[in-house]
Amino acid sequence: MGNDGSIIRVKDLTAGYGRTVVLKDITFDVRTGEVFTILGGSGCGKSTLLKHMIGLRRPMSGVVLIDGTDIVAAQGAERLAVLKKIGVSYQSGALFGSMNLLENITLVLEEFTELPREARETIAQMKLNAVGLLDAAYKMPSELSGGMRKRAAIARALAMDPQILFLDEPSAGLDPITAAQLDGLILKLAENLQITFVIVTHELASIFAVAQRVIMLDKTRKTIIATGKPRDLRDQSDDPVVRRFFRRQAGGSDSA
């Protein structure tokens, strides 16, 4: 953890594909225990930034430090140690369709621990209970609603007791009531488990409901154009792109 209480530090990150730059000169910190949100209009680089933060892609330049360790440069035992500090829930849920929920979670524990089967199943049940899905432990993903699949994916991401949980568009495709229930779950987990959340989203209702601090990316400028509390950005920002986003106003290619 950094001296200022940060658990994630992104420094001078430039990212892209081939010779195409998607993001440039990105610098920010995420503090331990906060609910931090990455937002912006379509195509602004939110998912690209997430992939770099969890070590799936190598930046063109700059670094991503997780609890002081460069997640890309780390090798062997050091890389495994840093990966155990993070959990990821993808937009699609990415559950294995041929396994029930309990098996989806125990598979993670089987791969990364030497716990006996009974212990793995007990932990999996605890994670499902934490997201309100203990009664669905033996159901297949195809038997679940969209909201239940999202919660199941979060339960699996929690399997290794991560310090940081990354959520990619958790409310995407959900009706407003189900999305609000998921927001409530995120707040409950953040409080009860004392873990850091990094959420990629463009859903305004969720941003205002859960985010303590946000950064906003811009497709045209390819960098961070705003940082702060969402209501402060909505009410006080002088940037027209930021104002349009938070006030749901049309006008310009970067409006959400």
Image (cartoon, helix red, strand yellow):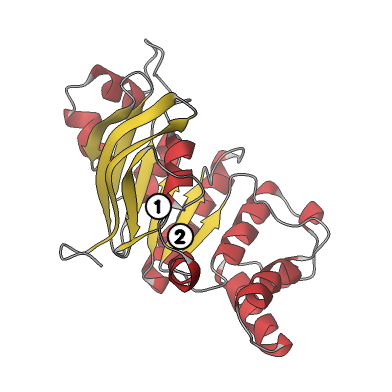
Above or below for 173 versus 146: above
Q: Judge left or right: residue 74 versus residue 114.
A: left
Residue at image mark 2:
165
For the C terminus, the image quarter is top left
Where's residue 242, x and y in %? 28, 25
Q: Is residue 47 above or below residue 141?
A: above
Tags 1 and 2 touching, CB below 8 Å = yes
Residue occupying the point 24% across, 43% down: 229
Label 1 element class: strand
List the residue tagged with mark 1: 198
Spatial CA distance of label 1 from label 2 is 6 Å
> In which image quadrant can residue 40 be found?
top left
The picture quadrant where one finds residue 248 is top left
Q: Quadrant of residue 155?
A: bottom right
Residue drawn where x is 53% and y is 53% of the image? 181
Amino acid on which the number 2 mark rests in the picture: Leu
Sequence-first tag of 1 and 2: 2
